């Protein structure tokens, strides 16, 4: 297992020097943020980012993420050119020594929360989702939620949502299959592992189709192009926001098949209505068995990348919601501690 940390480039308030000081930290997960979606990432920009990260004593082997253009998800006529561009970006990343590309196929927006700073009893703040609040929103009147992409004007957003209502899950699956069959060959030839991130939250919202939300979806996705390069970013917190998803058994199944290339490990507190908020990583802080999840990865012989994903804001820290230094650092050390505990226990039982 290789521990990594998400970093948003020079504008990130968490400096690379601080990340390096987290015990057991292997590398950085980042992206090139100044290339328009759908255009090819130049080798020079990738190398510049890699050089900066590695100058701080950290590896750079995982990209999160290369965005998939909306025209590809919608199956518009422009998709062939955009898929060709995506495939070339994959080749360029491989040329620079990258190993894994995390991406998602969520329509319009890649995550949804109704509050970015929910106060917890201990005084920390966290990301949260209120299902009733989302249900009350009429997309026709506009969507105003924290963290949502504001790059669409109201009229553009309305038209886009209407177009997706004509797509539905079946067509979105077909469009994802078209994308995978266009990109996975480039990943195979260049030695890159593609790792799709599940929907967050894993349910339809605002009438938008969602197709990467449970174990059946993950099985279907992997079967579309049944090769190791077509794999998963198994996000415990995203999938765990549905109480019907058993993350331990998912890890056992898909890590056992060698199809998890990137692990996001975080905890969430979920209720039967679908409301949830993010918690500290420790198992008893939320609804997920983080210790069981880590053991499942260990038992599967997982050698891939992991990151502590989101964290609360604690100790007075301010910054990008979910991406402060302190709580994510605690999460990284907690996960590494669980891993070492399992490993030491195995050594002891072997004697």
Image (cartoon, rainbow, N blue to C red):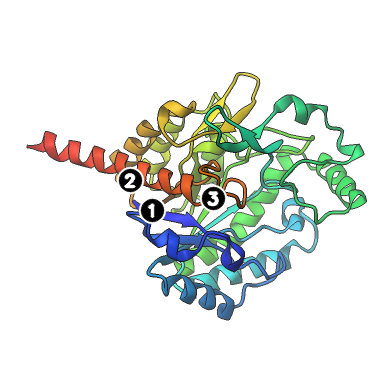
Labels 2 and 1: the sequence-earlier one: 1
Tell me the CA gap for discs 3 and 2. Answer: 19 Å
- Callout 2 secondary element: helix
Labels 3 and 2: the sequence-earlier one: 3
Q: Which residue is mark 3?
A: 324
Q: Which residue is mark 2?
A: 336
- Callout 3 secondary element: loop
Q: In front: 225, or 248?
A: 248
Judge left or right: residue 191 versus residue 314: left
**What residue is shown at x 44% (from left), y 34% (from top)?**
250
Does 266 sit above or below residue 134?
below
Q: Residue furthest top?
A: 272
Residue 278 shows in the view: yes
Tag 2–tag 1 contact (CB < 8 Å): yes
Q: Position of residue 343 (x, y in %)?
A: 22, 42
Q: Residue furthest front?
A: 316
Q: Dot 3, how many residues are within 10 Å of its Cα: few (below 14), some (14-19), or many (20+)?
A: many
The mark tally for this picture is 3
Q: Residue furthest left?
A: 351
**What residue is shown at x 19% (from left), y 36% (from top)?**
345
Q: Dot 1, how many residues are within 10 Å of its Cα: few (below 14), some (14-19), or many (20+)?
A: many
Q: Nearer the viewer, mark 1 or mark 3?
A: 3
Q: Dot 2, how many residues are within 10 Å of its Cα: few (below 14), some (14-19), or many (20+)?
A: many
The dot on residue 3 is 1
Q: Position of residue 86 (x, y in %)?
A: 63, 66
Judge left or right: residue 350 versus residue 218: left
Judge left or right: residue 4 versus residue 268: left
């Amino acid at each position: 297992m290789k521990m990594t940390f998400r970093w948003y480039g020079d504008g990130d308030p968490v400096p690379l020097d601080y990340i390096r000081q987290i015990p057991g930290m292997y590398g950085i997960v980042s992206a090139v943020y100044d290339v328009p979606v759908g255009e090819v990432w130049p080798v020079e920009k990738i190398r510049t980012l890699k050089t900066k990260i590695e100058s701080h004593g950290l590896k750079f082997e995982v990209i999160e993420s290369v965005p998939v253009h909306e025209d590809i998800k919608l199956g518009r006529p422009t998709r062939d050119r955009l898929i060709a561009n995506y495939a070339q970006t994959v080749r360029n990343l491989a040329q620079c020594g990258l190993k894994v590309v995390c991406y998602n196929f969520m329509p319009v927006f890649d995550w949804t929360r109704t509050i970015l700073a929910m106060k917890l009893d201990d005084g920390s703040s966290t990301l949260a989702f209120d299902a009733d609040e989302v249900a009350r929103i009429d997309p026709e009147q506009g969507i105003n939620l924290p963290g949502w992409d504001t790059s669409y004007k109201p009229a553009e957003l309305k038209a886009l949502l209407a177009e997706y209502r004509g797509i539905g899950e079946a067509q979105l699956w077909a469009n994802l299959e078209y994308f995978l069959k266009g990109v996975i060959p480039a990943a195979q030839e260049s030695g890159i592992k593609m790792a799709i991130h599940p929907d967050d939250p894993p349910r339809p919202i605002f009438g938008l189709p969602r197709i990467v939300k449970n174990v059946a979806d993950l099985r279907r996705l992997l079967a579309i192009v049944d090769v190791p390069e077509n794999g998963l970013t198994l996000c415990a917190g995203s999938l765990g926001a549905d109480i019907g998803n058993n993350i331990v058994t998912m890890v056992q199944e898909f890590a056992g098949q060698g199809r998890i290339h990137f692990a996001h490990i975080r905890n969430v507190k979920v209720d039967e209505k679908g409301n949830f908020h993010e918690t500290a990583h420790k198992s008893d802080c939320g609804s997920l068995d983080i210790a069981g999840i880590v053991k499942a990865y260990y038992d599967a012989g997982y050698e891939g990348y992991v990151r502590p994903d989101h964290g609360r804001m604690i100790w007075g820290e301010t910054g990008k919601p979910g991406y402060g230094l302190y709580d994510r650092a605690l999460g990284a050390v907690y996960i590494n501690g669980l891993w070492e505990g399992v490993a030491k226990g195995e050594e002891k039982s072997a004697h």
